[in-house]
Amino acid sequence: MSIKSFLIKQAARYISKQKNGQALKGLQYQEKIRKELVAVGQATAYGKDHQFDKIVDYASFKQQVPLVDYEALRPYVERINAGEENVLWKGRPKYYAKTSGTTSGAKYIPLTKESIPNHFGTARNAVFNYIAQTGKVDFMDGKMIFLSGSPELEKKGDILLGRLSGISNHLVPNWVKGNQLPSYETNCIEDWEEKLDRIVEETMNADMRLISGIPPWVQMYYERLLERTGKKTVLEVFPNLSIFVYGGVNFEPYREKLESLVGGRIPSVETYPASEGFIAYQDQQDAPGLLLNVNSGIFFEFIPADQYFSEHPPRLSLAEVELGVNYALVLNTNAGLWGYSIGDTVQFISKDPYRILVTGRIKHYISAFGEHVIGKEVEQALLEALEVEPAKVVEFSVAPQVTPPEGGKPYHEWWIAFDQLPQNLELLAERLDLAMRKQNIYYEDLVRDKILQPLKIRPVPADAFRQYMKSIGKLGGQNKVPRLADDRKIADKLRELFPSA
């Protein structure tokens, strides 16, 4: 063990103990953060417009802080861009994290001096917690690869602007920089295919020990790496590879394929970062769930997902949540986001401490017939079906077929990219439909009452969704394929690309 690893191990033990202690006092820290945010917010333009001086408790907080999306904050962001200070938060942001808007182009999410530790301190805490739990620290002496967006930053007015993963490249601490790959120059390549080739070139002979990234893009890296080296498994190329850090999507649908490429199972740490804030991370190696970041500048609120689109949806504090309920997540942050719905849904599996599962996106669902199917349900149903009728699935997406061109009743259409087809595709579809009926009682009622036909599978080639992402200009980086859509934009594009499916 090097001196650096020895010192990191000591720091990891201290920080892990500190964070785990805070997690057991989640309600106290949430109340403290709410008061601190409001105290600062009172002096901002947003706080004055919404009379933050009237806030004395959580009930009055909900009265004065409206539930918003980005469009409601856009006028305030434009005031910041014009040079105004103390608009959403004190002073001016240090950065903007640029994300794709669903309705009106790019969104610019502020990062402030106060919020930056939430993003980058939490990433450190997740890895340090793993070290403290397992005692494993030798990976800190080897190379680490972070598959991310370009670190090249633009300017929006006088504020630096880029993808969150790109901004993070500029904030990597010096004690990590010497171990980090790929190089800055390679990370700046915008074309994903070219960038991937360069990453393989730079890393194939390195002592790689930690790999971090979104699973589908890590899979592409592994495949390209094995193709280039002629090896059968990643562990033959990187015998000291010992940890995989990931986030952004559910790992389970990718697990079998990734472990096949790696040549076995290696320890992993799941994280839940977003441009709006680093929300949670895996704190246990032997149990499910992510530890909610209760003391990191974010005051959390929760809306029961089945009431989200009602005229006056209920907003709950952490003290009011229940286990097993699907909630839409709302953030109030020290970056100046107030009552901000980020579009994700979560379920609590523990209150002592507060641990969550990420269940999907509030806008990524199917409810064309009133069934309100969510991401967690389709992912779990597919895993159950594959236990009975094995196959190797690369990626999938589900859409409603309301007016089937072949006639008959509507159904759910599953577009599945197979690396290896099942022996009996019809049996897999049958098992999948049964699993879905178990997952969602509304879907069960619709199929039982013959309002819907049982689901249909459209098999497509293993690289189908990569072709799809490339066709819409979103190949690589942090981009993800939605598992569910209440419209047919993805399905129709796949039909265009693969007319024989």
Image (cartoon, rainbow, N blue to C red):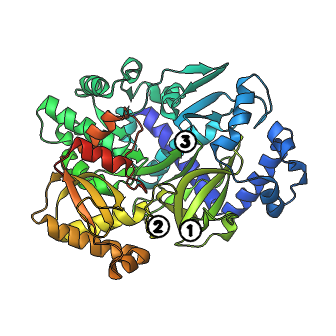
Q: Is residue 251 at all visible to an observer of this figure? A: yes
Kindly identify the amino acid type of the residue bearing the numbered disc 3.
Thr
Query: What is the three-letter code of the residue carrying label 1?
Result: Asp
Coordinates of residue 408 in the picture (x, y in percent): 27, 69
Residue lying furthest bottom in this view?
A: 449
Residue identifier under label 2: 372
Residue 45 in percent (x, y) is at 83, 37
**Residue 120, percent from left and from top:** 56, 38
Q: Secondary structure at mark 1?
A: helix
Relative to 392, residue 153 above or below:
above
Instruction: Please provide percent x and percent y for residue 28.
Output: 73, 61
Label 2 element class: loop
Above or below for 137 versus 442: above
Residue visible at 60% across and 63% down in the picture: 308
Residue at left 50%, top 54%?
363
The disc label shown at residue 306, or none: 1
Q: Give 132 or 419, whichever is nearer the viewer.
A: 419
Q: Quadrant of the N terminus?
A: top left
Q: How many angstroms separate mark 3 from mark 1 (CA)?
A: 22 Å
Q: Residue 103 has which mark? A: 3
Check whether the beta carbons of the residues at disc 1 and disc 2 lie within 8 A of each other: yes
Depth order, front residue of 328/113: 328
Mark identifier at residue 123:
none
- State which tag comes first along the sequence, 3 or 1: 3
**Separation of marks 2 and 3 at Cα, in angstroms:** 22 Å
Of pointers 1 and 2, the one earlier in the residue sequence: 1
Horizontally, is 88 left or right of 389 in the view?
A: right
Tell me which residue sits at (33%, 61%) in the image: 403
Point 11% across, 66% down: residue: 424
